[in-house]
């Protein structure tokens, strides 16, 4: 390109409608940009502004600016402007486009911004095939911060952080982001262009326009990488910088189309219309009319309940479900309830446990430190928690007999091979419900209708409901048989 | 009003959508993942957007985008994820963008563990990102409050154009309690400052850049004014038997629940104990503390972190009363007994006597049960 064209790098005022006629967001020198003479950013701006003009989308355009020399894109473009954090423009653009699908969202990024700190965001945005346009200005260096190495810095190229030139041995090789992104399925159009001469500039303009147009047509992700001169940091004249783009940079970053599915890509469907506001509670399953009325009326009048239960066992034994059915039944019966699962360190060995409280009064703490009833589905759980059961409390233990060394004299113990009993009923996994049956008999507080309703709410499979109901009955019978005196 | 049994984490999402949230960007992490999962299930049905981001860094920047587009947006995470979000949160505060972030705290530092802790207090309440900003912080202690305070968080985020945190420990996120929701969804009009890709919003700009020193200082002063106003209007606390309390227990989240139980027992033992529970951690409800300092002789801070809330209580009291401190960490929860023991020791030092009951007070149900069992 001639030096005459280089002068054109300046964004001349009033050229494109998508530019502000005067750059009033700038503090001073409002008739010119902040870019150095010969800088590629200015010319890329101009090509983008022209594309916006030609496509007639100025009102619809949202420009997401990066951190880098082009941080002030909002000085120039008379479109909706959002300034993003370093490297994150694709994430910002993703969300803007998703929420405003009628808008045209362009993310503008430098090579440090896109290929270093923002490498994850660009990769995943491209991989999701977001219907946005990315303009990627590659000048092989961190310009704004004074010339440190970028992932795109050429081998041997000097920078303030590669004073002897980039070495593959220590800094690796120039990162080919466009090639990398072109290995993904989703992107529609990826092309590398350059600003090395007039012909290249003309091609760059076309590519940028097409990348924006793809979005307008709803086709999906398009990215244009522009090899762009930075005479200031490269310490070259504008003309030499341009030549360097053409003769040196291009060798590492060959120009051309890396992906083009513009012809085959089908426009993306717009999201379905949002439901009416009145529909929302129903959609969330919180609409009053859809909630069960409960069986509070079935509670023994005047019955004061304060049940503190700890349930423990191996994961997969139905510990949490047992607790949930109990809590759900309590709620159905009009009681205050809480259910708190233990998780974290205690879960490591594959054991799980939960705290359940049912009370006639508001529950202060949902943690059950001293349970009135402990359901221990295996021996480790028994050994872990039996000491915590309050004096006079109950232990329901899944085992033939209580281990000799852990019998507390002040507890009531129902020990039975619940797994085996469940197996006899049809499925060993129903042991939790047999234990719950026994527990309900001991607690004696909950109306059967509430337990039934809770079970049906939580267990969706009808075969399981039937089995669980039989299991509950089995548990009740077992308790009655073992402790006939308990039945009031 | 009919109630439903629900996990705190799930209640957050339902409440958020009712409060007008239409965008959720998140990255899974225990014990906050149920929020992200429920968002994936419900947001698209409600006409909103859900994206599982590639990282918390991306998630918070997606929030930045959604908020810029004038959409009510939220995310949820825990310790390590919140650490990663801090730059983005600072940007949002700087650009005056509303959003709601639920932090369901787990153990730290580092990978720590996934058990319930409160160690994110400093990074959330003090604004763990860079620069001169604050975030508003709401601290639920029940599932109902997970719902109610999430709705409030959206209201405050929009009113103050600032990120608002819902800060809960793992237990409050994981536990199930009965909860009820408003039956009307909030209509969330697009704010006038948003950038939506329309002719009307073309002149709008979202940025946190203020190039001149005076310009940036003026901006930060404006933010300060906003925080001060929030301090005057939004500070909240729950007072539980504090009217005549000589010993005031202080805690938030699950700890406050334990403190309420301890309070009941201590009062049974004749000790004048109350619980002061900050509901907003920023703005900190300092006035409540100053008021209670008139009568209380001692404050006892209980937390599942290393003295983070403790700092704020001491600041609020400014030396007016001694502040004692009890903490458990790593997933350990201060037990009822250990807190009670601590309280009794301090009470004894204050010369207060524990009234030993001739017969321990127990509920009718327990008594009844015992009677039944007497035969066994
Ligand atoms: C988190 C963060 N880290 C570092 C910076 C400092 N920084 C600003 S711009 C920049 C590099 C920009 O280089 P590039 O994206 O290539 O853009 P150019 O200036 O070359 O156009 C860096 C490192 C920052 N603003 N934020
Ligand atoms: S330093 Fe380089 S990239 Fe930055 S404005 Fe100057 S020429 Fe352009």
Image: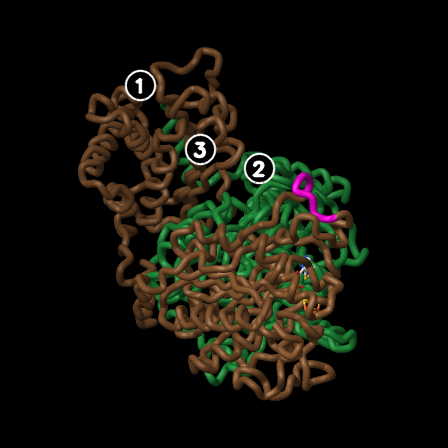
Chain colours: A brown, B green
Q: Is residue A168 magenta?
A: yes
Residue at image x 58%, y 68%?
A195
Asked whether residue A141 appears in the rendered view, the answer is yes
Q: Which residues are magenta?
A: A165-170
Residue at image x 42%, y 79%?
A55
| Image location (x, y in percent) of residue A269 | 31, 66
For marks 1 and 3 on the same chain, the one whose residue lies earlier in the sequence: 3
Q: Which residue is mark 2?
A: B113
| Local crowd size for mark 2, using a 10 Å CA cut-off: few (<14), some (14–19), many (≥20) | some
Q: Which mark is residue A324?
A: none
Residue A299 relative to residue B335: left or right: left
Callouts 2 and 3 in the same chain: no
Q: Nearer the viewer, mark 2 or mark 3?
A: 2
Q: Which residue is mark 3?
A: A353
* Circle 3 chain: A
Which quadrant is the C terminus of chain A positioned in?
top left
Q: Mark 2 touching mark 3, by CB under 8 A?
A: no
Question: Judging from the image, what secondary structure is the residue with disc 2 in?
Answer: strand
Q: Which residue is mark 1?
A: A417
| Image location (x, y in percent) of residue B323 | 75, 49
Residue at image x 50%, y 55%?
A178
């Amino acid at each position: 390109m001639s030096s005459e064209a280089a002068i054109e790098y300046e964004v001349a005022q009033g050229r494109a409608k998508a530019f502000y006629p005067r750059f009033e967001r700038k503090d001073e020198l409002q008739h010119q940009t902040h870019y150095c003479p010969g800088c590629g950013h200015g010319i890329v701006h101009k090509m983008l502004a022209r594309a916006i003009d030609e496509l007639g989308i100025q009102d619809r355009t949202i420009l997401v600016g990066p951190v880098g020399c082009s941080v002030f894109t909002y000085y120039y473009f008379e479109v909706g402007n959002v300034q993003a954090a370093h490297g994150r423009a694709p994430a910002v653009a993703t969300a803007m486009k998703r929420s405003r699908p009628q808008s045209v969202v362009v993310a503008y990024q430098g090579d440090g911004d896109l290929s270093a700190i923002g490498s994850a965001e660009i990769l995943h945005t491209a991989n999701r095939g977001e219907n946005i346009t990315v303009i990627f200005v590659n000048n092989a260096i961190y310009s704004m911060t004074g010339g440190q190495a970028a992932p795109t810095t050429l081998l041997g190229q000097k920078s303030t952080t590669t004073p002897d030139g980039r070495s593959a041995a220590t800094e690796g090789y120039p990162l080919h982001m466009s090639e990398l992104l072109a290995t993904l399925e989703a992107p529609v159009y990826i092309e590398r262009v350059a600003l090395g001469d007039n012909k290249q500039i003309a091609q760059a303009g076309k590519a940028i326009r097409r990348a924006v147009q793809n979005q307008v047509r709803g086709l999906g992700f398009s990215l244009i990488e522009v090899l762009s001169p930075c005479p200031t940091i490269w310490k070259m004249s504008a003309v030499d910088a341009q030549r360097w783009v053409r003769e040196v940079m291009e060798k590492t970053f060959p120009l051309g189309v890396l992906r083009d599915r513009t012809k085959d890509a089908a426009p993306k469907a717009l999201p379905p219309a949002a439901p009416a506001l009145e529909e929302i509670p129903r959609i969330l399953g919180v609409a009053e009319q859809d909630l069960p009325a409960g069986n509070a009326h079935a509670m023994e009048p005047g019955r004061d309940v304060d049940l503190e239960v700890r349930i423990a066992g191996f994961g997969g034994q139905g510990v949490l479900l047992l607790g949930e059915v109990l809590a759900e039944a309590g709620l159905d019966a009009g009681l205050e309830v809480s259910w708190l699962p233990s998780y974290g360190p205690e879960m490591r060995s594959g054991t799980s446990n939960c705290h359940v409280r049912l009370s006639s009064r508001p529950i202060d703490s949902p943690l059950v430190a001293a349970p009135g009833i402990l359901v221990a589905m295996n021996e480790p759980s028994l050994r872990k928690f039996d000491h915590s059961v309050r004096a006079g409390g109950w232990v329901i233990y899944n085992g033939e007999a209580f281990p000799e060394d852990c019998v507390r004299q002040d507890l009531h113990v129902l020990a039975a091979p619940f797994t085996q009993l469940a197996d006899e009923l049809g499925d060993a996994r129903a042991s939790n419900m047999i234990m719950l049956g026994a527990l309900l008999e001991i607690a004696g507080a909950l109306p059967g209708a509430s337990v039934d309703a809770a079970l049906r709410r939580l267990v969706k499979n009808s075969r399981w409901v039937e089995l669980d109901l039989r299991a509950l009955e089995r548990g009740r019978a077992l308790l009655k048989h073992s402790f006939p005196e308990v039945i009031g | 009003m009919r109630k439903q049994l629900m996990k705190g984490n799930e209640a957050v999402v339902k409440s958020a959508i009712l409060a007008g949230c239409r965008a959720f960007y998140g990255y899974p992490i225990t014990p906050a993942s149920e929020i992200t999962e429920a968002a994936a299930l419900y947001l698209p049905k409600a006409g909103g957007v859900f994206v599982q981001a590639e990282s918390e860094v991306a998630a918070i920047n997606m929030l930045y985008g959604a908020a810029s587009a004038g959409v009510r947006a939220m995310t949820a995470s825990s310790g390590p994820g919140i650490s990663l979000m801090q730059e983005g949160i600072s940007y949002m505060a700087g650009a005056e963008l509303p959003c709601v972030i639920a932090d369901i705290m787990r153990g730290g530092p580092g990978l720590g563990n996934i058990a319930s802790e409160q160690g994110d207090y400093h990074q959330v309440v003090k604004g763990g990102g860079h620069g001169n900003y604050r975030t508003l912080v709401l601290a639920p202690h029940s599932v109902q409050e997970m719902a109610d305070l999430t709705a409030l968080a959206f209201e405050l985020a929009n009113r103050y154009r600032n990120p608002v945190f819902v800060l809960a420990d793992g237990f409050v996120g994981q536990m199930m309690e009965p909860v009820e929701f408003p039956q009307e969804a909030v209509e969330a009009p697009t704010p006038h400052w948003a950038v939506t890709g329309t002719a009307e919003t073309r002149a709008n700009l979202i940025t946190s850049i203020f190039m001149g020193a005076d310009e940036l200082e003026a901006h930060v002063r404006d933010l300060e004014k906003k925080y001060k106003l929030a301090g005057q209007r939004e500070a909240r606390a729950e007072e539980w038997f504090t009217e005549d309390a000589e010993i005031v227990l202080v805690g938030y989240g699950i700890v406050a629940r334990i403190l309420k139980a301890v309070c009941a027992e201590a009062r049974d033992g004749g000790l004048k104990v109350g619980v002061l529970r900050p509901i907003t951690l920023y703005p900190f409800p300092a006035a409540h503390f100053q008021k209670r300092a008139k009568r209380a002789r001692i404050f006892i801070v209980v937390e599942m972190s290393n003295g983070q809330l403790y700092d704020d209580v001491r600041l609020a009291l400014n030396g007016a009363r001694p502040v004692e401190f009890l903490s458990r960490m790593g997933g350990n929860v201060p037990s009822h007994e250990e807190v009670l023991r601590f309280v009794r020791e301090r009470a004894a030092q204050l010369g207060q006597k524990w009234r030993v009951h001739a017969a321990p007070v127990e509920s009718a149900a327990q008594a009844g049960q015992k009677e039944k069992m007497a035969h066994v």
